[in-house]
Image (cartoon, grey):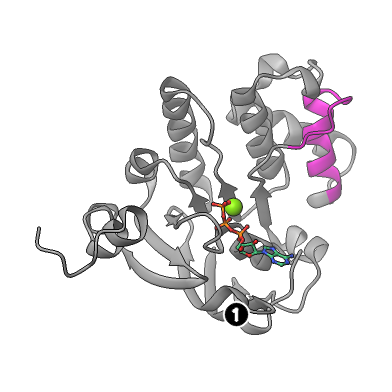
Amino acid sequence: MSLEVRGLTKSYGQVVVADHIDIELQTGQCLGVIGPNGAGKSSLFHLLTGTVMPDAGAISLDGNELSGLPAHRRARLGVARAFQVPQPFAHLSVFQNALTASSFAAGLHGEAAAAAAQDALRVCGLASAADKLAGALPLLDRKRLEMAKAVAAQPRLLLLDEVAGGLTEREVHEIVDLVQQLKQRYAVIWIEHIAHALHAVADRIMVLHFGRKLLEDSPAKVMDSDIVREIYMGVPANAAA
Ligand SMILES: Nc1ncnc2c1ncn2[C@@H]1O[C@H](COP(=O)(O)OP(=O)(O)OP(=O)(O)O)[C@@H](O)[C@H]1O
Ligand SMILES: [Mg+2]
C-alpha cells in the first residue's frame, strides 16, 4: 500500500484546519501526528476518510485518486478509522459491532463477514468479549473495539485517533503493543498526545499547528525540537538552552 497526499487544504471560514499538507506512507510504516488541541489532527482524518471534502489537494491510495470520492467508496478501497471518542452500537454485542464493519465498510457477506469480524476481535484482544454488550465495556476495551471495527473493515490505511487517550499507563502499553502488531499489516497514521506511546511505534512524527505541518522527522528529533518546545510549552524557539 502506498499513500500519497499532496497539498491537502481545508478552511472553515477563518479557521484553517489543513494548509497544504503532504504525506507519504507505505505498509509497515507508522506516521505519528501531534499538535495542540484544535491543530487540525482529527480534521486530517475527516479529509482522508471523506466525511469532509477538501478545498484543494490530492489523495492517492495505490494510484486510486480518493479526494473526490464519498466516504463509503474510500472505505471499500481500504481507508478505515478508529474515532477519538468510541461510539459503539451500545445495544449490540462486541461481535455484532465488528460485523457491521466487515459487512458495511468492507462489503463482505455471510461466513466471510463473520470470519473477518472474528479475526479483528482476535487481533485486537477482544475474542473472549465477543458476546458482551458493547455498551458494558470498560474504556480500554471500547478503545480496542474501536480499533477492531477498523480492522474488520479490511483496511490498507489505518487511521487511529487518540486510541490511547484517557487510559492508565499499563493500558497505554497494551495499546502500544497492539499498534506495533497492526503496523506489520497496514500503513498506520496515529494521532496521539502521549509522547512515549508514539515514540515507541512511529517511524516518523509530524507536528501540526493551525493546520500546517511545521515539522516531520524521527520521533527523537521531533521530541527534541525547538518547535515542539515552543508550541507545547511556550518556550521561544530562539531561547538559550
Ligand atoms: N465542522 C466544523 N466547522 C467549523 N470549525 C470546525 C469544524 N470542525 C472542526 N473545526 C475547528 O477546526 C479546528 C481543528 O479541529 P480538530 O478537531 O481537527 O482539532 P484536533 O487537532 O483534532 O484537536 P484535539 O486535540 O482537541 O482533538 C478547531 O478549531 C475546531 O473547532
Ligand atoms: Mg482531535
- The answer to which of 19 and 48 lies nearer the viewer is 19
The residue drawn where x is 63% and y is 38% is 147
Coordinates of residue 164 in the picture (x, y in percent): 51, 35
Check disc 1 and give the amino acid type: Thr
Answer left or right for 148 relative to 160: right
Image quarter of the C terminus: bottom left
> What residue does disc 1 label?
9
Residue in view at x 52 percent, y 74 percent: 4
Q: Which residues are magenta?
A: 87-104
Label 1: few (<14), some (14–19) or many (≥20) C-alpha neighbours in 10 Å = many
Q: Disc 1, ligand 1: is the CB inside 8 Å?
A: no
Image point 47% across, 62% down: which residue? Answer: 26
Say left or right for 11 vs 23.
right
Queried whether the magenta region covers residue 98, the answer comes back as yes
Decide: is 112 above or below 188: above
Q: Position of residue 36 (x, y in %)?
A: 46, 56
Q: Position of residue 92 (x, y in %)?
A: 87, 26
Q: Kindly indicate the quadrant of the structure image that contains residue 9.
A: bottom right
